[in-house]
């Protein structure tokens, strides 16, 4: 299993620095509160920044014996260091209008002092500072590799901020938060690196000299009339140091935001000035941006960034672990030249390997010689007769990492035998390029002289085991194999809940029936979730899409003559018990914000929709239901629910089609075509289309929708508007 | 006229007495003290100003630039004196001074320590860098106390000014 260089570096960087990153993020979270709590202190005096320096000095001189300096910090608190008329030296927060003390200077709270130390040097002094600096740089590199990974995932840099597709909690929020905290993280890490470097004097020292200014011989008796003191206001300055003595060589030192001035204490002339050099400015801004001092908003942003970093560590590692668990060691007993069946896998995250392994084991169990490998390892196979390709798609139609060279390899590698091939694509309908790479592989094989198809390309949505099993069964049938693909046992532990049958509506003409079952334990579920039932003596669970009607679960089941599960359910009587577990299926929950929703189903696929249209909270959208069945009689069973919904204005339209109808045969697709104006209007307004039922129906419907979209809206169908749950 | 003279005499004697009394209670004098640092890279410096008795040992801590007491043990020589007693120095501590910066403080010295063999010591330490026991040290004399004193370590010079 190969892994892309960017993902690998992202992971290695994370592993090498995670402990320090956790520490820095935790302490950073605490430290974000310091500037906030300081800023909330009431020492900033209103309008003080507009007060002139001369008035401030005059006020101070009237109140105190001597002034040593005044400083204005990022919170606009003014600190004065003075000698009082009683001869005591004191330093405090000042109101410049009255020159009175308004509070004692804030001492750094012990918790912040401790945390600051831990944050910047881990109590290891220089060693610690170096470590923190390096870790900060590593985090910066992770942000960069992260950008590349997101860009690849989104298809291109241009789509960086377009919608992220939700497949997995950790992955989704890792990417989503990554996008939004990217800029703060880059700022925090770079300033962190800069502050560390600054301490190690790695930065070139650019000396900016004080430049002497030309002096004119004007003598002004008192400071209040100094020109410069009248023009400067407290908003312009960072601090003023008063002359140390009466000596003419002792100046007023005025620190402005970008320079320092020496001012003659007798005539108010600028003796010399020094512009802050780049390093001073950079240090200043690094400090402000890194610590958030002076701005509550930025501090809060830093706080959120710190918390997100903690989440990244957590979600990142849990993804890496999942991927590791997905990585399946290939133990071939046959080599490439002795095996009859060749399985080639294209996988980015490793989950496709799981399926390949199932197939591999099933073939071995039949005593067949199988060889499994990656698409990148494509070569000549001397004894092979069958080629099975299982591949996912990366991003918007790219080859997964371990399949990158296949396209070239298949052109360059001669094959001795004719191979009968079948391609299975794994992907998610939520992506625009659903199974696009599998389609490409299928095309490549079609063009190959030594390859003949044994089955057409099969696409599997959201890693559905049932779909995969269906494909495997079909394929095995075509090969006359009694293939038995078993569901892997290490699926997440299922919570079994007992249920009681509360309603049942008997078989209709379509051999379908309805069950309403009530959970005996309090559990949360929604229409669109899946109910897994494992009949006795069976290992494979059957899944049914459920509708939620009040507190009960509505199941719509088709009885198959030899169906173990459907017969078991059909034999249940009122008040009988059964155990099953509910699997969340958020991908098929009713959209929260859509204004219009089209629900399309056939046969028993109507069950989740029956739940959705009876939901009391359903008010925000206009809903249309398309249903296809065999005859009008098969519809009767559902009519009560639909009539109620119609009466309660939860449905704005119901369109039925019957394949064995009185006058003409009609499928859902036909109904959709008839209502193409409605369908295109909904698509245009970003309404949602939900599809539940058989895969054949799904494929037909998607084709129809694509047609309507191209025809009416002149754009390909936006797959983001489509939710499916088909089997 | 005589009474006036007498009155003046009494007043003079009284004031003289008062002055001598004040002089002998040894009211501490305050001095403004400026520490100017050299341009060095690294953390802010800890500067401890101590009064040294004629025997050459610490008598009293006058000022400490650097308020994080976790690092006080780095100022080893002074720590040996201060660490034992840990007298309250909250009122006479300030922030560390960075390279190129200067700090002005007010320190108090009793008049009987002037011209009697006492000296003033400026001790400096910077995290992970050299430590100077006697960055600046000079005998406390009326003359000395008004001069500029060059430093040997992180201090470029110090200047003192008696407060009136």
Image (cartoon, coloured by chain):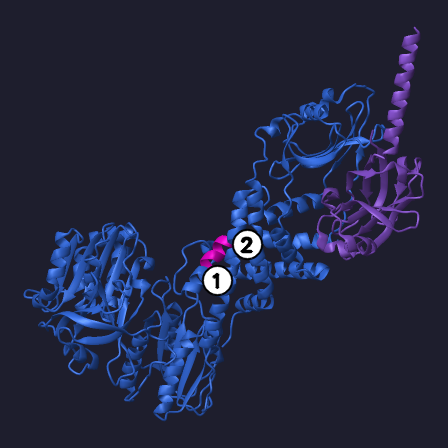
Chain colours: A blue, B purple
Checking the image for residue A29, the label placed there is: 2
Residue B95 in picture, x, y percent from top left: 72, 45
Residue A287 in picture, x, y percent from top left: 64, 47
Image quadrant where residue A507 sits: bottom left
Q: Secondary structure at mark 2?
A: helix
Image quadrant where residue A488 sits: bottom left
Residue A200 appears in the picture as rendered: no
State the extent of the magenta-drawn residues as a range: A174-185
Residue B144 appears in the picture as rendered: yes
Residue highlighted by disc 1: A152
Name which of mark 2 and mark 1 comes first in the sequence.
2
Residue A355 in picture, x, y percent from top left: 38, 78
Q: Nearer the viewer, residue A92 or A446?
A: A92
Q: Is residue A677 left or right of residue A158?
A: left
Task: Please tell me which residue is depicted at 23% across the width and 50% down the height of the picture.
Answer: A619
Tag 1, which chain?
A: A
Task: Please tell me which residue is depicted at 63% across the width and 53% down the height of the picture.
Answer: A116
Q: Report whether mark 2 lies on the same chain as mark 1.
A: yes
Residue A349 in picture, x, y percent from top left: 45, 71
């Amino acid at each position: 299993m190969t892994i892309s260089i960017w993902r690998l570096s992202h992971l290695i960087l994370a592993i090498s620095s995670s402990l320090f990153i956790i520490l820095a993020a935790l302490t950073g979270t605490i430290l974000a509160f310091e500037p906030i709590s300081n800023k909330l202190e009431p020492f900033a005096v209103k309008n003080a920044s507009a007060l002139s320096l001369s008035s401030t000095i005059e006020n101070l001189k009237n109140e105190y014996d001597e002034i040593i300096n005044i400083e204005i910090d990022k919170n606009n608190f003014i600190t004065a260091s003075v000698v009082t008329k009683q001869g005591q030296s004191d330093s405090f927060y000042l109101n410049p209008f009255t020159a009175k003390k308004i509070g004692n200077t804030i001492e750094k709270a012990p918790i912040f002092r401790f945390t600051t130390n831990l944050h910047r040097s881990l109590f290891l002094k220089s060693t610690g500072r170096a470590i923190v600096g390096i870790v900060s740089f590593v985090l910066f590199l992770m942000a960069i590799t992260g950008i590349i990974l997101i860009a690849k995932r989104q298809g291109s840099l241009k789509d960086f901020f377009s919608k992220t597709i939700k497949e997995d909690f950790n992955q989704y929020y890792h990417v989503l938060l990554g996008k939004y905290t990217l800029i703060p993280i880059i700022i925090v890490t770079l300033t962190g690196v800069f502050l560390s470097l600054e301490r190690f004097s790695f930065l070139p020292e650019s000396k900016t000299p004080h430049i002497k200014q030309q002096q004119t011989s004007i003598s002004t008796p008192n400071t209040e009339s100094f020109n410069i003191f009248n023009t400067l206001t407290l908003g312009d300055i960072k601090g003023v140091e008063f002359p140390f003595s009466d000596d003419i060589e002792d100046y007023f030192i005025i620190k402005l935001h970008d320079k320092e001035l020496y001012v003659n204490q007798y005539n108010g002339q600028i003796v010399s000035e020094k512009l802050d050099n780049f390093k001073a400015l950079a240090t200043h801004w690094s400090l402000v941006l890194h610590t958030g001092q002076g701005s509550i908003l930025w501090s809060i942003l830093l706080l959120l960034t710190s918390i997100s970093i903690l989440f990244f560590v957590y979600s990142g590692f849990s993804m890496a672990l999942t991927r590791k668990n997905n990585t399946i060691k290939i133990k071939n007993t046959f080599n490439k030249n002795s095996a009859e069946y060749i399985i080639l896998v294209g996988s980015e995250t490793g989950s496709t390997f799981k399926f390949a392994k199932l197939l591999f084991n099933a073939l071995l169990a039949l005593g067949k010689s199988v060889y499994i490998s990656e698409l990148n390892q494509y070569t000549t196979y001397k004894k092979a007769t069958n080629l099975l390709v299982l591949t996912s798609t990366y991003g918007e139609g790219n080859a997964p990492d371990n399949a990158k060279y296949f396209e070239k390899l298949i052109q360059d590698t001669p094959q001795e035998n004719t191979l009968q091939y079948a391609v299975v694509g794994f992907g998610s309908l939520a992506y625009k390029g659903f199974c696009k790479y599998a389609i490409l592989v299928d095309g490549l094989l079609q063009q190959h002289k030594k390859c003949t198809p044994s089955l057409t390309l099969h696409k599997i949505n959201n890693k559905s085991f049932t779909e995969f099993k269906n494909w495997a069964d079909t394929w095995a049938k075509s090969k006359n194999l009694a293939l038995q693909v078993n569901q892997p046992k290490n699926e997440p532990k299922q919570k079994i809940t007992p249920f009681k049958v509360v309603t049942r509506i008997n078989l209709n003409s379509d051999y379908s029936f309805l069950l309403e079952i009530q959970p005996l334990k309090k559990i949360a579920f929604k229409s669109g979730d899946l109910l897994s039932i494992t009949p006795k003596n069976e290992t494979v669970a059957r899944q049914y899409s459920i509708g939620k009607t009040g507190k009960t679960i509505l199941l719509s089941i088709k009885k198959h003559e030899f169906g173990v599960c459907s017969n078991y359910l059909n034999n249940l009587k009122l008040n009988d018990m059964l155990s099953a577990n509910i699997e969340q299926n958020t991908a098929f929950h009713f959209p929260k914000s859509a204004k219009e929703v089209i629900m399309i189903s056939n046969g028993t696929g109507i069950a989740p929709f029956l739940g959705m249209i009876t939901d009391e909270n359903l008010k925000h959208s206009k809903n249309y239901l398309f249903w296809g069945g065999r005859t009008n009689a098969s519809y009767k069973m559902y009519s009560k629910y639909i009539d109620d919904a119609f009466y309660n204005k939860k449905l704005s339209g119901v369109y039925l089609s019957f394949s064995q109808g009185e006058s003409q045969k009609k499928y859902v697709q036909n109904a959709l075509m008839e209502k193409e104006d409605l369908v295109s209007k909904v698509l245009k307004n970003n309404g949602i289309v939900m599809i539940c039922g058989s895969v054949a129906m799904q494929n037909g419907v998607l084709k129809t929708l694509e047609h309507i979209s191209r025809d009416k809206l002149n754009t390909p169908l936006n797959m983001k508007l489509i939710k499916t749950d088909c089997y | 006229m005589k009474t006036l003279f007498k009155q003046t005499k009494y007043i003079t004697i009284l004031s003289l007495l008062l002055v001598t009394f004040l002089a002998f209670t040894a009211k501490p004098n305050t001095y403004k003290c400026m520490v100017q640092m050299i341009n060095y890279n690294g953390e802010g410096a800890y500067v401890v100003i101590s009064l040294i008795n004629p025997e050459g040992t610490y008598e009293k801590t006058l000022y400490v630039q650097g308020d994080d007491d976790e690092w006080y043990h780095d100022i080893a020589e002074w720590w040996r004196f201060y660490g034992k007693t840990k007298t309250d120095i909250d009122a006479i501590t300030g922030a560390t001074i960075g390279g190129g910066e200067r700090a002005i403080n007010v320190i108090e010295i009793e008049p009987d320590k002037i011209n009697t063999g006492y000296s003033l010591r400026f001790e400096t330490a910077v995290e992970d860098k050299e430590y100077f026991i006697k960055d600046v040290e000079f005998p406390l004399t009326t003359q000395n106390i008004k001069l500029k004193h060059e430093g040997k370590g992180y201090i470029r010079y110090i200047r003192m000014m008696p407060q009136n």
